[in-house]
Image: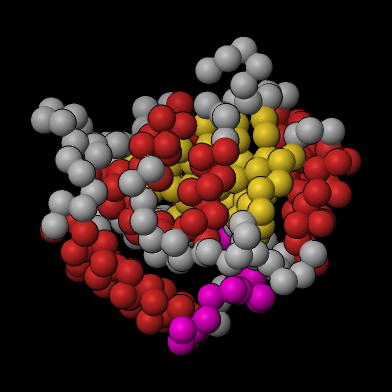
Amino acid sequence: MSATAPRLSVVIPAFNEEARLVGTLARVLDYLHGRREPFEVIVVDDGSSDDTAGAARRAAAAAGGAVRVVANVRNRGKGFSVRRGVEESRGEFILFSDADLSTPIEDVERLFAALLEGGCDIAIGSRAMKGSDVRVHQPWYREAMGKTFNKLVRLLVLRGFRDTQCGFKLFRAPAARDIFRLQRVERFSFDVEALYLARRRGYRVAEVPVTWYNSPSSRVSIVRDSARMFLDVLRIRLNGLRGGYGPAAPAGRGMKR
């Protein structure tokens, strides 16, 4: 990395987030300035029908270059948007965070500890670990959907993770770029695919307990997106079986959990 490159890139995918994006960016910027390390924030507007892009650009102008805005021509999905943010990033470490800050930005310190002290390549926030602090729960039917989805993921694709869907994950940049160049799922199951690829490529992954608040205005449809997520898990399984993700980790390259 060059001397002027940011230490941390924060990627925030945003779809119809005009109402809360300004507050989210203010909190993120306040925290990152306090860390006293070079950083950048990349907002990826996913073809919003409101003024998400405008709100992000106004915040970027006020931030003096600390925020960049990337706009998808049309709605492509969270997975596509995170991938695009990773491609645009310049940081040594790359965090992606949901625009609603369901996990407070301050919890990135827990993820950094797993990377810097634990020697991992990727640290993922978890709502299901001992030590997790779920302050506001989802409605019971969404929690039931999440548990069912997690069982399906563990059965078909990815054993060992208690929570693949928390939208708060930190990567060493080389691992992120390697994984997301192979990633294909464009919508909500992209987390599963990214972790599947991390394991396949031999990266060390830590699941870390975090604080979490349910956002009442979730973008996930209980019917439409649930069916799509289940189908995407099947596609990930088939892609892996058919060799669609390229070679697995070189012999002798270890994984750490």
Q: Determine whether 148 is above or below 191 in the image.
A: below
Residue closer to the observer: 250 or 117: 250
Which residue is depicted at the point 53% across and 75% down?
220
For the rendered model, the colour scheme is secondary structure
The stretch of residues the image draws in magenta is: 209-224
Q: How many numbered discs sit on the rendered protein?
A: 0
Is residue 212 within the magenta segment? yes
Residue closer to the observer: 239 or 162: 239
Mark yes or no: residue 133 visible.
no
Where residue 184 sits, quadrant-wise, is bottom left
Q: Determine whether 152 is above or below 157 in the image.
A: below
Position of residue 231 in the picture relative to residue 133 (left or right): left
| Direction front: furthest residue | 73
Image x and y of residue 152, in percent: 26, 72
Quarter of the rendering occupied by the C terminus: top left
Q: Determine whether 146 is above or below 180 in the image.
A: below
| Direction top: furthest residue | 3
Which residue is depicted at the point 71% across and 35% down?
32
Q: Determine whether 223 is above or below 172 in the image.
A: below
Residue closer to the observer: 37 or 190: 190
Q: Main secondary structure of the magenta part?
A: loop
Mark yes or no: residue 60 visible.
yes
Which residue is depicted at the point 62% across and 60% down?
73
Position of residue 166 in the picture relative to residue 152 (left or right): right
Image x and y of residue 75, in percent: 58, 66
Which residue is depicted at the point 59% across and 73% down?
219
Position of residue 224 in the picture relative to residue 242 (left or right): right
Position of residue 182 in the picture relative to residue 200 (left or right): right
Where residue 248 sits, quadrant-wise, is top left
Is residue 171 within the magenta segment? no
